[in-house]
Image (cartoon, rainbow, N blue to C red):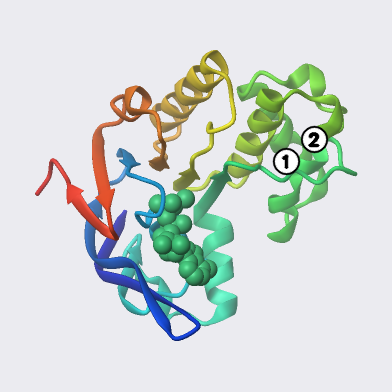
């Protein structure tokens, strides 16, 4: 599902080069749940954002479903991103002036689906995250954990094959954090969604099929190597 070859990102800041990710080669199978742990600054976010088609690599390749994503034009790349990849980040950034339902519908409206069908699918996703009773609430009327669940429903609305989650539970209390991870595991099983999850929480990382460790831009531990 995801393959990277010699994936490298060097940021140029002033006259200094920062090697954020260095020669990462990864293979993630269909339906696999992979976690990544590592110190702050070890390159996790940069790696995820190159895999997700958001940050252009300095060197190397990313294949998603067999497609060399960084060889695509901007339009094709954003289409692939919208159709195949769901993003869940720590600060979920729901749109404050839209209700929970409208927030979840948003990614699907880009792919020109019929509005009514989109609304039905968005309601299904909110049901999955157990928020059916809050579809008309605005983000400010929801708790942090509920907002996170809306963001998860939003990431799922296009039924992506891949979910990239970057410390999605970082600011949640322990119980809510556990609930969110259990929800990910359920989605992984029910929809055959491939997960790549960055987390600080080792206990949660251990629940994955495979746990990778990053340090100074490299994967220093991969059970498959
Ligand atoms: N946009 C950027 N410009 C310059 N340097 C960056 C940028 N983003 C990240 N970095 C640097 O790249 C390294 C890896 O960062 P990051 O991928 O965010 O690590 P992590 O997510 O593991 O904390 C860090 O040294 C960070 O300061
Ligand atoms: Mg990060």
* Residue placed under numbered mark 1 in the picture: 104
Does 46 sit left or right of 106 as displayed?
left
SS class, disc 2:
helix
Q: Is residue 95 above or below residue 129?
A: below
Q: Tell me the crowding category of disc 2: few under 14, some 14 to 19, or many 20 or more residues within 10 angstroms, Cα based.
A: many
* Residue placed under numbered mark 2 in the picture: 101
Provide residue 181's location: percent of width, then percent of height: 46, 25
Does 113 sit left or right of 203 as displayed?
right
Q: Given the current orientation, which residue lies at the most extreme top position?
A: 175
Provide residue 210's location: percent of width, then percent of height: 23, 36
Q: Is residue 199 visible?
A: yes
Q: Is residue 36 above or below residue 140?
A: below
Q: Is residue 26 above or below residue 79?
A: above
Q: Is residue 118 visible?
A: no
* Along the viewing direction, whichever of 130 and 55 lies nearer the viewer: 55
Callouts 1 and 2 close, C-beta under 8 Å: yes
Seen at 31% across and 73% down, the residue is 61
Q: Tell me the crowding category of disc 1: few under 14, some 14 to 19, or many 20 or more residues within 10 angstroms, Cα based.
A: many
Does 134 sit left or right of 220 as displayed?
right
| Quadrant assignment, res 11 | bottom left
């Amino acid at each position: 599902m995801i393959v990277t070859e010699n994936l490298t990102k060097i940021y140029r800041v002033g006259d200094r080069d920062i090697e954020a990710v260095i020669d990462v080669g990864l293979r993630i199978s269909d339906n696999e749940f992979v976690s990544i742990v590592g110190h702050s600054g070890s390159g996790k976010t940069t790696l995820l954002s190159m895999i997700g088609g958001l940050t252009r690599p300095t060197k190397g390749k990313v294949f998603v479903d067999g497609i060399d994503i960084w060889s695509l034009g901007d339009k094709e790349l954003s289409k692939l991103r919208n159709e195949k990849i769901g993003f869940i980040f720590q600060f979920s950034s729901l749109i404050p002036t839209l209700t929970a339902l409208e927030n979840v519908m948003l990614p699907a409206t880009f792919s020109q689906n019929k509005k009514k069908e989109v609304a039905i699918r968005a309601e299904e996703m909110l049901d999955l995250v157990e928020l059916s009773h809050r579809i008309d609430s605005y983000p400010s009327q929801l708790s942090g954990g509920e907002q996170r669940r809306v963001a998860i429903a939003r990431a799922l609305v296009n039924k992506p094959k891949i979910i990239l989650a970057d410390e999605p539970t970082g600011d949640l209390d322990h119980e809510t954090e556990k609930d969110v991870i259990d929800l990910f595991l359920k989605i992984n099983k029910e929809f055959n969604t491939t997960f790549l999850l960055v987390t600080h929480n080792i206990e949660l990382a251990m629940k994955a099929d495979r746990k990778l460790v990053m340090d100074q831009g490299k994967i220093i531990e991969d059970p498959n190597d």
